[in-house]
Amino acid sequence: MNKRPRVTVVGSFNTDLVSRTPRMPVPGETILGGPFHMGPGGKGANQAVAAARLGADVTMVVKLGQDIFGDQAEANMIKEGIRPGFIFRSAETHTGAALIMLDAQGENMIVVAAGANNLLSPEDVDKAEEAIRQADVLLVQLEIPQETVARAIQMARESGVKVLLNPAPGRELSGELLGMVDVLTPNETETQIVSGLPVTDLKEAQIAARQLLDRGVGAVVVTLGAQGALVVTPAGVEHVPGLQVDVVDTTGAGDAFSGALAVALAEGMELAQAVALANAAAALQVTKIGTASAMPYRDDVDKLMAD
Ligand code: RIB
């Protein structure tokens, strides 16, 4: 019998085209950068790979184009052990692509050409109904249409499946949608966008998170980069510190965090303990270049936590 925790991800795939650069260009400027790197990415697929590498039985609901990037994406998901039943393909547009500039400090700027991600529809979600209703955790982000996100969340809620929403890229969300989310994982910028309140320090982050609780979210976990995460629930606030590592590339750190949190919650861990595991996964992810390819494996995360 398969006892691995089941995580279903409804989300995006992008081929990441990464250019290293000594600094970011300003508008109208061309600069000579460093090495180029291409690999699988997209917030949905990154989180699916993170969850699979950490030991979950992962199903991904995603839409790709019928092009070479789509072929590579599908092959990579299968290689990572992700169940392939709901990898849809469309001839109408291209596979999602992300143009990423990565500076010497490991910080990034990203433009996403969403392509087929924009065509992932509520009807596609309906086709994956069983995989959503039988999951332990549904994991969603905001790189696909909002009505698709809403359909998946509603389905999961009806079946008592825990809903984890990583609200990235940040968008305003309806109270109806927020009221169906068990755990929300925004970074500070996304906390500001989703709540509509200013977030310039930890105190304001707490105020904004409490407003999101008032609007129906079960728990808000504000990710703070190297500082770890702030866990805000109706029971109170807890700061779970991050782990100090040598940062090479921060791209995908939030995805490592949300993917790991989904696995830990699917395993039944309580929230603060699950956040500690997610912090460790994110810390390992930023020590490597790349997004999906840099996701850590469970043994390495467990070892880091034990140290
Ligand atoms: O979160 C990182 C991801 O954002 C990248 O992989 C890129 O594809 C964009 O979706």
Image (tube, grey):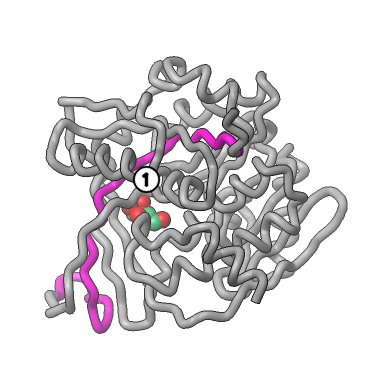
Q: Secondary structure at mark 1?
A: loop
Quarter of the figure with residue 132: top right
Whether 292 is drawn above or below 67: the answer is below
Residue at the (63%, 47%) spot, across then down: 184
Residue at the (41%, 49%) spot, across then down: 43
The N terminus lies in which quarter of the figure?
top right
For this view, does 131 lie left or right of residue 22? Answer: right
Quarter of the figure with residue 111: bottom left
Residue at the (51%, 37%) spot, across then down: 57
Q: Is mark 1 within 8 Å of ligand 1?
A: no
Ligand 1 image-quadrant field:
bottom left
Label count reads 1
Q: Which residue is mark 1?
A: 80
For this view, does 9 lie left or right of residue 134? Answer: left
How packed is label 1: few (under 14 Cα within 10 Å), some, or many (20 or more)? some
Q: Is residue 47 visible?
A: yes
Q: Residue furthest front?
A: 1
Residue 100 at x, y = what percent?
Answer: 27, 63
Find out whether residue 64 is within the magenta segment: no
Residue 176 or 88: which is nearer the viewer? Answer: 88
Magenta stretch, residue numbers: 5-29
Whether 6 is drawn above or below 160: the answer is below
The C terminus lies in which quarter of the figure?
bottom right
Residue 76 or 118: which is nearer the viewer? Answer: 76
Whether 125 is drawn above or below 94: the answer is above
Residue at the (37%, 25%) spot, across then down: 86
